[in-house]
Image (cartoon, rainbow, N blue to C red):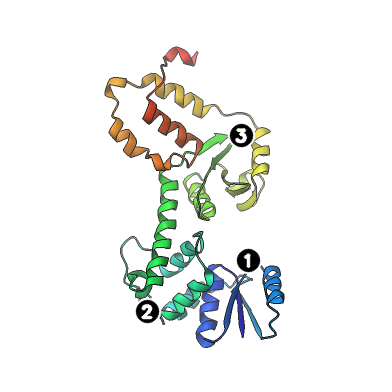
Amino acid sequence: MIIGFSPTVDGILLACSCFRENPDAELVFAKDVQELDRKLSFSGSNRQVKILGFTPYGRAESLSKEVFGKRKARMARFDPNPIRYVDLLLRHKDCDPVELVQLIVSCNGDTDQLYSGKGRLAKRYYNYMRDVSRAYERLCMFSRPDLKGGILSVVIDSPHDIGELFCGWLARKNPDVPVAVIVNSTAWVGNGDLIGLDRFAKITAAFIESLQSTSGSDDVDDLWDIYYDSQMIESRRNIGLAKKMQPKFSASMSKMAKRDRYKVERGIANCRLDSFA
């Protein structure tokens, strides 16, 4: 038997349940059914194929209890629950969904093994989860979105697939304005119903840029820069604290973060309140 599954939380849980009952099955993952068909046709196998996770399942909680067991996992205060754990892992650039299914099934319902890191594979995947979690937390703390054309947008650069997560957080923090998180040529949009889109949508970055260019300009960021620079007293500047509040590793997260870090390293430009006139 071949178990073909999607690399989503539902797909992983369904594949774990099926693989537990058929341990000799071959695991194959694909982003969609068309990709799965191409992989199967390329392999030339005539074995029975079980296709899982390509349509919404809707019973993730009950399936999670079946796969991970009913007992609450023993874990640190900052560790996520098993479903969130799987979701974060799937966003890591090096995560192999086949390895993940094999790891979860090998735990045999003992969720502690996923968090304890006793095995080499379990430790590596636990570190993957923490990498993604830290990258997401850095975005929430240090990114600086720009309000342009009535849309609060930010361009991020991360090796992990966390644009969707960050967009959800940004939309919750700013429920009265549309938000956009741009990753390369893709944009995640939150509160999109305010501009005639779905509440949460994935569109092209070019479309967001076109919306911003057709709207009025926002000078809030420039105005804040002028005010901040004019009120800054160089003799009271705490460089150590400034570097702590805007770390260097976070400077690449957004355009405004780069400006913040530049001021930390180079100081504040000469500016007076006359600049407002």
Looking at the rendered structure, the kind of residue marked 3 is Gly
Label 2 packing within 10 angstroms: few (<14), some (14-19), many (20+): some
Q: CA distance from mark 2 to mark 1?
A: 29 Å
The residue pinned by badge 1 equals 31
Of tags 2 and 1, the one toward the viewer is 1
Q: Which residue is mark 3?
A: 149
Q: Is residue 149 above or below residue 60?
A: above
Residue in the foreground of this view, choosing between 189 and 133: 133
Q: Secondary structure at mark 2?
A: loop
Amino acid at pointer 1: Lys
- Badge 1: how crowded within 10 Å, few (<14), some, or many (20+)? few
Q: Nearer the viewer, mark 3 or mark 1?
A: 1
Tell me what residue is drawn at x 36 percent, y 78 percent. 71
Badge 2 amino acid: Asp
Evaluate if marks 2 and 3 touch, with contact meaning CB atoms under 8 Å apart: no
Cα separation between marks 3 and 1: 34 Å
For marks 3 and 1, the one nearer the N-term is 1
Looking at the picture, how far across and down is residue 240, in whole percent? 28, 34
Name the disc covering residue 110, or none. 2
In the image, residue 70 sits, relative to residue 187, either above or below, namely below
Residue under the image location 41 percent in, 51 percent down: 137
The residue depicted at 51 percent of the width and 75 percent of the height is: 13
Residue for point 34% across, 60% down: 78
First-in-chain label (2 vs 1): 1
